[in-house]
Image (cartoon, rainbow, N blue to C red):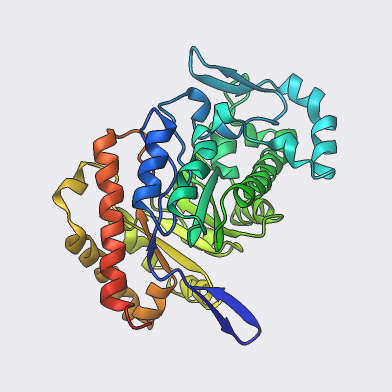
Amino acid sequence: MREDNGNETRYFPDALATGVGSMPHVKAEDACRFVADTLTTAPFWPQLPKRSFRENMYVQYSEGFPGFQIDEAEQKMWVDTARMMEGLEAFYEKVLANDLEAFAISREYAEGLYAMPGMLRPRHPDGPVLYKGQVTGPVSMGLTVTDENRRAIIYNEAAEDVVVKTVAMKARWLESYMRGSVPAEKYLMFYDEPYMVSFGSAYLNMTHEQVVGYLNDCFEGVSCLTGVHCCGNTDWSVILDTTVDVVNFDAYEFGVGLTLYDKHLKRFLARGGILAWGIVPTSEAVRDENYRTLAGRLEGLLERLEAKGFDRVEVLRRSMITPSCGTGSLPVELAEEIFTKTVEVSDFIRERFLREV
């Protein structure tokens, strides 16, 4: 739902349900059909890492990255720094020209991206309320992809900017493709940052200012809503200090951690920020839960915020409900149970707290 507030137009998702990104299906049609039939309000296009190594969350966004090497047989990836240096001039020419097609994600790298529009059209002829896509964030991309000497590529002075600009250009191309293939009221781009759980440790040698800068640079150039997903504890002040619109977190295991950043959260929500509660566990633990027990966990976290001066209904109006993480490594049956319960929690919360809003 959209509401006008003075000179500002803000988006209120009202606890709608969506997903994080990866699914365990091998056939794109099966994954897309399930998403289209289940997440009817806010579907997403699924990443399918079991279908192909090229759908690995780091390989998937490598096209256009100079010097990027893939060994599918060994399931390895790295950057050949000599080839990268040779390709820098051509790379920056494409970036400066805003040549989005040079950073397109091809079908062999993202079958679900291309299969989803055909699944959605007969089910949602006018389009869903929200359509979500995702890219791998610059911190996680830069720390996971290494050079030929197994050194994280983001610590290579020449490659640091290449990582950020590649992610930024991928997001711009992806938004353009999503808008052209699926009509929707709103579009959302997640930047998945699992390695933000290492912020502040010896493993991640980056400052608060660096990470904020990387993410903000990646958000520039897209006109849709932006989101950051991190599936563990982190220094949430870093993400909340960016210009991001949606913060997605594992509320099932680590929800209390985010509530400790109440001052940052108040500023975030005051500027129109949205919390995407990953309250449904992406593990066998989900079998012991139902929508009432999961909603109860969420209510417990909301009570913590209420004790710090937050309004429960206002927070829920600026909330989404998601699984705690991607489901790409799980059995298909378990993944589908997780998404079904995500929708059930969303429906229950909307009926209980937001019916008259």
Q: Is residue 255 above or below residue 317?
A: above
Q: Identify the residue at horizontal 75%, vertical 20% (top origin).
A: 83
Q: Identify the residue at horizontal 54%, vertical 56% (top origin).
A: 188
Residue with the most extreme bottom position: 6
Residue with the most extreme left position: 288
Position of 291 compared to 140: left or right?
left
Query: 178 or 230, which lies in front?
Result: 178
Q: Is residue 218 visible?
A: yes
Query: 305 or 149, which lies in front?
Result: 305
Q: Quadrant of the C terminus?
A: bottom left
Could you tell me residue 320's position as x and y percent? 40, 63
Query: 255 or 71, which lies in front?
Result: 71
Query: 311 or 264, which lies in front?
Result: 311
**Occupied quadrant, residue 255:** bottom left
Q: Identify the residue at horizontal 56%, vertical 32% (top origin).
A: 60
**Occupied quadrant, residue 208:** bottom right
Residue with the most extreme top position: 73
**Occupied quadrant, residue 332:** top left
Could you tell me residue 295's position as x and y percent? 24, 65
Q: Is residue 310 above or below residue 297?
A: below
What is the number of callouts on the image?
A: 0
Q: Is residue 86 above or below residue 308?
A: above
Could you tell me residue 139's position as x and y percent? 57, 43
Q: Is residue 324 visible?
A: no
Position of 167 compared to 351: left or right?
right
Position of 3 compared to 21: left or right?
right
Q: Identify the residue at horizontal 50%, vertical 62% (top origin).
A: 246
